């Protein structure tokens, strides 16, 4: 295994790289806080309206709320823009940002369709700018470590990859969010919103792309009650005035998977599993050992053996490989969680920004990988529609994923 690039700092450190954030909701706030931990000057925030941006800027202690994307891009101090707006805005906003010559970090899913994400890959490549997709779950230190375990052959040949991503915040017919509107969230909902994380993570951990899928999607709540006013993500407040809405997107998905090395897999995805707030689990069964991880116990990695006792690795920089070490911020026993993954991912991204552009094999998820995940989503949708196994339709021009162990991680 080669030395890892993740802990690199670019020629210019993060404290000299100006940023701005689009979106000030649930995840925009997490972006701002992670950037502050790295010492990045966040010059301002763009919201759904100038008033909202100004109000959120005050609440977050930021210098200003921008009135428009044009105003944000006219701020010469901003070298990189983080896009955390609802999904339908990713494509137009990222295009404008790249055309204005800025680096960009975009939330998942990268776009609404694979056609859109393909255009973003091309535009980013032409621009020569850093382009990253916020698949932050890769950056739990133990997931970086699991990637290294597989890459170094510790688990043997990967044979079976199973798991789930369950939440319960859309369990009731009165639960509402923009993700339920296909023109803002996309044609796939549970798969696009949270399944995208699991599918990306399975690919990252194993170093194997998904080649075909067999998917069964279900909508258990075909009619929901949309509140008349706006709703915060993960909000549990109930509105008294509601409008009935028909829902066509899936509440749950069950997907069988084939990987390019012949490994098999399955994942269940749900936004209405009572009690499961944010439970992503995976197990990778190899020919000599297995690894299991659960996002609700993120500092523990179970490692299974046939002929000796199983192990539980508690996250510990002293016991992990270089990538796991680079992603960790705290010593063992001082639990790291969701927000810490943003800091670790941004540190890797900002090293490239500090060097002026992406390295050949970036140590973070790029638009090419965000696009690949969109292609898997397309295959999931087509499989569910047609009721049969469906291959992931990769165009020959698509940049190949970096094989495990070849990217220096
Ligand atoms: N990586 C993760 O773990 C993770 C977690 C949650 C959400 N996300 C992604 O982040 C994005 C936002 O999700 P969220 O949960 O924060 O949603 P949210 O509804 O909490 O926040 C969205 C924000 O976008 C703003 N906005 C709306 N229209 C805008 C416009 N025209 N210009 C600028 N801002 C605008 C809203 O004011 C709001 O502040 C989605 O793409 C989602 O998939 C990623």
Image: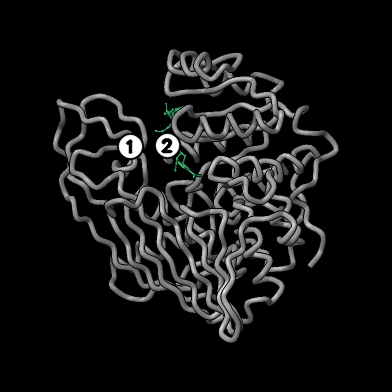
* Residue 105 to residue 190: above or below: above
Question: Sequence order check: which comes first, mark 1 or mark 2?
Answer: 2
Locate residue 51, reporting x and y percent: 43, 13
Q: Which quadrant is the N terminus positioned in?
A: bottom right
- Residue drawn at x 18%, y 50% is 221
Q: Quadrant of residue 89?
A: top left
- Can you tell me which quadrant of the image ligand 1 is in? top left
Neighbourhood count class around disc 1 (C-alpha, 10 Å): few under 14, some 14–19, many 20 upward: some
- At 51% from the left and 47% from the top, the residue drawn is 110
Q: Position of residue 83 (x, y in %)?
A: 54, 35
* Pointer 2 residue Cβ closer than 8 Å to ligand 1: yes
Q: Label 1 to label 2, Cα distance in Å?
A: 8 Å
Q: Secondary structure at mark 2?
A: loop
Number of numbered discs visible in the structure rendering? 2
- Residue 15 position within the rendered picture, expressed as x and y whole percent measured from the top left: 76, 28
144 on left or right of 184: right
Q: Quadrant of the C terminus?
A: bottom right
Report which residue position mark 2 lands on: 86
From this viewpoint, is residue 90 visible?
A: yes
Q: Residue furthest bottom?
A: 307
Q: Is residue 286 above or below residue 102?
A: below
Please say which color scheme the image uses.
Answer: one colour
Query: In the rendered image of this protein, does residue 407 appear above or below residue 213?
Result: above
Report the residue marked by disc 1: 178
Q: Are marks 1 and 2 in contact (CB under 8 Å)?
A: yes
Residue 250 visible at all: no
């Amino acid at each position: 295994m080669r030395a890892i690039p993740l802990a690199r700092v670019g020629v210019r450190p993060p404290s000299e790289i100006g940023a701005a954030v689009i979106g000030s909701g649930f995840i925009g706030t997490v972006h701002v806080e992670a950037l502050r931990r790295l010492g990045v000057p966040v010059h301002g925030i763009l919201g759904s309206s100038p008033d909202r941006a100004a109000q959120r800027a005050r609440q977050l202690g930021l210098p200003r709320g921008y009135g428009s994307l044009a105003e944000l891009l006219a701020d010469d101090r901003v070298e990189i823009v983080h896009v955390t707006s609802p999904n339908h805005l990713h494509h137009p906003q990222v295009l404008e940002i790249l055309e204005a010559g800025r680096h960009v970090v975009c939330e998942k899913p990268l776009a609404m369709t694979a056609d859109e994400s393909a255009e973003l890959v091309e535009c980013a490549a032409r621009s020569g700018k850093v382009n990253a997709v916020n698949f932050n779950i890769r950056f739990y230190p133990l997931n970086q470590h699991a990637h290294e375990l597989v890459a170094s052959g510790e688990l043997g040949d990967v044979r079976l990859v199973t798991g789930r991503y369950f939440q319960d915040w859309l369990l009731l017919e009165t639960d509402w969010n923009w993700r339920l509107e296909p023109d803002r969230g996309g044609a796939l909902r549970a798969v696009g919103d949270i399944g995208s994380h699991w599918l990306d993570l399975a690919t990252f951990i194993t170093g194997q792309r998904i080649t075909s899928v067999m998917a069964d999607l279900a909508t258990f709540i075909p009619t929901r009650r949309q509140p008349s006013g706006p709703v915060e993500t993960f909000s549990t407040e109930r509105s008294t005035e509601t409008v009935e809405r028909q829902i066509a997107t899936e509440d749950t998905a069950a997907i069988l998977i084939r990987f390019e090395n012949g490994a098999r897999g399955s994942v269940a995805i749900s936004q209405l599993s009572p009690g499961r707030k944010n439970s992503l689990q995976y197990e990778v069964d190899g020919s000599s050992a297995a690894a299991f991880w659960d996002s609700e116990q993120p500092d523990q990695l179970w490692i299974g053996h046939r002929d000796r006792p199983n192990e539980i690795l508690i996250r510990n920089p002293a016991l992990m490989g270089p990538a796991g070490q680079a992603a960790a911020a705290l010593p063992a026993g001082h639990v790291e969680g969701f927000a810490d993954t943003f800091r670790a991912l941004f540190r890797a991204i900002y090293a490239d920004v500090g060097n002026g552009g992406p390295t050949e094999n970036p140590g973070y998820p790029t638009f090419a990988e965000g696009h690949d995940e969109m292609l898997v989503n397309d295959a999931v949708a087509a499989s569910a529609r047609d009721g049969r196994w469906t291959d992931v339709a990769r165009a020959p021009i698509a940049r190949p994923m970096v094989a495990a162990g070849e990217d220096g991680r």
